[in-house]
Image (spheres, rainbow, N blue to C red):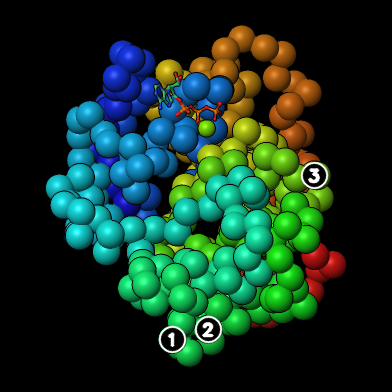
Amino acid sequence: MLRLEGLSKRYANGDRALDHIDLHVPAGQVVGLIGPSGAGKSTLIRCVNRLVEPSEGKIFLGDVELTALGRAGLRQARRRMGMIFQEYALVERLSVMENVLSGRLGYVGFWRAWFRRFPQADIDRAFAVLDRVSLMDHVDKRADELSGGQRQRVGIARALVQEPDILLVDEPTASLDPKTSRQIMRLIVEICAERNLAAIVNIHDVALAQMFVQRIVGLRAGRVVFDGPPESLDPAALTAIYGEEDWSKTMTREEEAEDRAHEAASEQLRGVRAPLIAEAL
Ligand SMILES: Nc1ncnc2c1ncn2[C@@H]1O[C@H](COP(=O)(O)OP(=O)(O)OP(=O)(O)O)[C@@H](O)[C@H]1O
Ligand SMILES: [Mg+2]
């Protein structure tokens, strides 16, 4: 689904943020991208939707070479990429519904969107995704009236209403409490399973990543230094990614990790069968 070939980024000030990254993310796979601050995680995500222009290399989304697109082509391709940022990327004074509908901006013309004349089909779509993220009771609230977890679910709904092929997620849980963080990660993973969506999720919380994603990619100084399943992320791998440290306290104990993996998997299945998350979100 998404393929990076020899992707490099050097910023104007000479900072080399990405150094020949090769990465293939198949449809339906959720990749957790970890690495120390400054490793290049956000740069990688932003290169994919070309908020940041790569210096070298190619990026393919399906058959489309994103790095070869002009403005119009890029605008079309961006519809297929749902961005989810830290919770605060909402328009505060707009309602939940309006924030979600803004995800359709790539489809309806600018002026139509400006006057908030969205087609009924878009409004129906927005209700469907708001239902999926359990926000039907908050549709008319303003964004600034919501809790952090609710705001992040608006962000997820806005990305979904685009009907993307891939989700690009930058630290979705950075300012959430541990329980809400799990709920948000679970929701993202469930939705990817239901819709066969690929995702790259930048995340600092290694244990949280291990609990929910199928594959972990570790970046260090712009290079991939780890790529494998969560259970093979051992102290040696963490040292390769983050440097020397006593990792015994960060690591989930093996049997505990197995329990969690099991819990995450069954939850994922349950999510597919019952689209509404029953849990007290
Ligand atoms: N706009 C920019 N101009 C110049 N250098 C930048 C810019 N954005 C990022 N960098 C540099 O590129 C490198 C990678 O930054 P990036 O933000 O991608 O890291 P990150 O892994 O997302 O870090 P964090 O975990 O702190 O969010 C850093 O050295 C950073 O200083
Ligand atoms: Mg970042």
| Residue lying farthest to the bottom in this orientation | 120
Relative to 8, does residue 53 appear above or below in the rendering? below
Q: Nearer the viewer, residue 56 or 112?
A: 112
Instruction: Determine whether, in the image, residue 116 is placed left or right of residue 108.
Output: right
The numbered dot on residue 178 is: 3
Q: In the image, is the residue at mark 2 within 8 Å of ligand 2 by its beta carbon? A: no
Quarter of the picture holding the C terminus: bottom right
The residue that mark 1 highlights is 119
Q: Are marks 1 and 2 in contact (CB under 8 Å)?
A: yes
Q: Is residue 24 visible?
A: no
Of circles 1 and 3, which is in front? 1
- Specify the amino acid type for callout 2: Ile
Quarter of the picture holding the N terminus: bottom left
Q: CA distance from mark 1 to mark 3?
A: 38 Å
The residue that mark 2 highlights is 123
User: Which of the two discs, 1 and 3, labels the residue nearer the N terminus?
Assistant: 1
Relative to 39, does residue 118 appear above or below in the rendering? below
- Residue 195: % across, % down: 48, 71
- Residue 86: % across, % down: 61, 45
Q: Residue at x 49, y 77 (%)?
A: 116
Relative to 24, does residue 274 appear above or below in the rendering? below
**Local secondary structure at mark 3:** helix
